[in-house]
Image: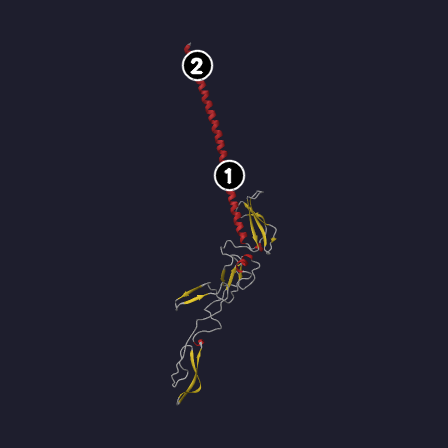
């Protein structure tokens, strides 16, 4: 009887252990299911976030590219653009112009807004605002206002800002340039430019080379040419000239006691040996001197 009771007790204990094990397995399965679901949701959220971030980066890149094109567009050529597809992408863009204003210096101003949308969206992923004016500082070229360049064409540069011919014209429309050079651009027509200051050269004696004050026109000049002669008449036929000098007969003259000889003129004429003109100049070709105004 006692063995039967013990057997029944062991059987009951085994059933209890089996039930506990099943419960543990069920609970573990439930926990793993919950963890798996949470992990799946987390991964979906992560991938969704990465995709959204990637879309935002692409939209930013398209907006920046569009903004660069607008910066290169002349102010007077700016125009609105309705919403349209960006070729071979999932994006659309549009361009809007603000109302134009005019400041005290008669400079026109407006703001250009570039908006980039993902197709199907009602809200822009990116909006960029680009201020523009009829006279603008050229930031991309790195060339400061007031820079002088030589230009070999009658067509003015189209890139790198606004350039003016250095002919003394007014700077009234260019306040930044006016602050540098005054009310007028320099007049460099028909002149060579020279570095301001002075220095001494020794290639042909010690010579000091000096400019005028900054912006002041300096007239042409040459080094002094000197020479001498002992007499312009002599009792012989050995009349000898060289280089720029020449001798011509000028009647007769009593040159010494008991004799006479033809009188002569002694001339100096540089054109006998070098090209001459009404100015001193080196070999040259004409160009426009331009100054950056904006």
Residue farthest top in this picture: 1
Colour approach in the figure: secondary structure
Q: Look at the picture and state if 106 lies above or below 90.
A: below
What residue is pinned by disc 1? 49
Query: Percent position (x, y) of residue 240?
Result: 39, 81
- At 42% from the left and 13% from the top, the residue drawn is 7
Location of the C terminus by quadrant is: bottom right
Mark 2 or 1, closer to the camera = 1
- At 48% from the left and 28% from the top, the residue drawn is 31
Mark with earlier residue (2, 1)? 2
Judged left or right of residue 248, residue 74 is right
Query: Percent position (x, y) of residue 257?
Result: 39, 89
Query: Percent position (x, y) of residue 116?
Result: 55, 46
Residue farthest front in this picture: 257
- At 43% from the left and 14% from the top, the residue drawn is 9
Camera-side residue: 126 or 17? 126
Name the image quarter holding residue 273. bottom left
Name the image quarter holding residue 245. bottom left
Location of the N terminus by quadrant is: top left
Circle 1 crowding by C-alpha within 10 Å: few under 14, some 14–19, many from 20: few
> Quick check: marks 2 and 1 in contact, CB under 8 Å?
no
Residue farthest bottom in this picture: 258
Camera-side residue: 261 or 55? 261
Determine which of the numbered discs, if any, sits on residue 9 in the image. Answer: 2
**Cα–Cα gap, marks 2 and 1:** 59 Å
Q: Look at the picture and state if 19 lies above or below 263.
A: above
Secondary structure of residue under mark 2: helix
Secondary structure of residue under mark 1: helix
Query: Percent position (x, y) of residue 274?
Result: 44, 74
Q: Look at the picture and state if 231 lies above or below 17.
A: below
Q: Look at the picture and state if 71 lies above or below 241.
A: above
Circle 2 crowding by C-alpha within 10 Å: few under 14, some 14–19, many from 20: few
């Amino acid at each position: 009887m006692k063995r039967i009771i013990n057997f029944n007790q062991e059987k009951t204990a085994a059933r209890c252990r089996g039930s506990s094990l099943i419960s543990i397995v069920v609970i573990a399965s439930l926990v793993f299911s919950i963890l798996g679901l949470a992990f799946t949701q987390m991964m979906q959220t992560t991938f969704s976030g990465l995709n959204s971030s990637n879309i935002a980066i692409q939209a930013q890149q398209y907006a920046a590219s569009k903004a660069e094109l607008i910066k290169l567009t002349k102010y007077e050529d700016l125009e609105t653009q309705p919403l349209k597809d960006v070729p071979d992408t999932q994006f659309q863009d549009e361009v809007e112009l603000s109302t134009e204003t005019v400041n005290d210096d008669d400079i026109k101003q407006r703001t250009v807004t570039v908006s980039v949308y993902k197709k199907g969206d009602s809200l822009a992923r990116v909006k960029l605002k680009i201020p523009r004016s009829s006279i603008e500082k050229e930031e991309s070229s790195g060339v400061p206002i007031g820079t002088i360049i030589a230009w070999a064409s009658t067509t003015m540069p189209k890139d790198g800002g606004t350039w003016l011919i250095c002919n003394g014209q007014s700077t009234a429309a260019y306040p930044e340039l006016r602050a540098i050079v005054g009310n007028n651009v320099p007049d460099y027509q028909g002149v060579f430019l020279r570095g301001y200051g002075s220095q001494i050269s020794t290639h042909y004696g010690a010579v000091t080379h000096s400019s005028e004050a900054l912006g002041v026109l300096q007239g042409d000049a040459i080094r002094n040419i000197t020479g001498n002669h002992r007499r312009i008449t002599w009792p012989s036929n050995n009349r000898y000239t060289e280089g720029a000098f020449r001798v011509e007969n000028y009647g007769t003259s009593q040159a010494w006691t008991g004799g006479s000889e033809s009188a002569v003129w002694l001339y100096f004429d540089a054109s006998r040996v070098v090209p001459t003109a009404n100015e001193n100049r080196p070999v040259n070709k004409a160009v426009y001197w331009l100054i950056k105004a904006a």
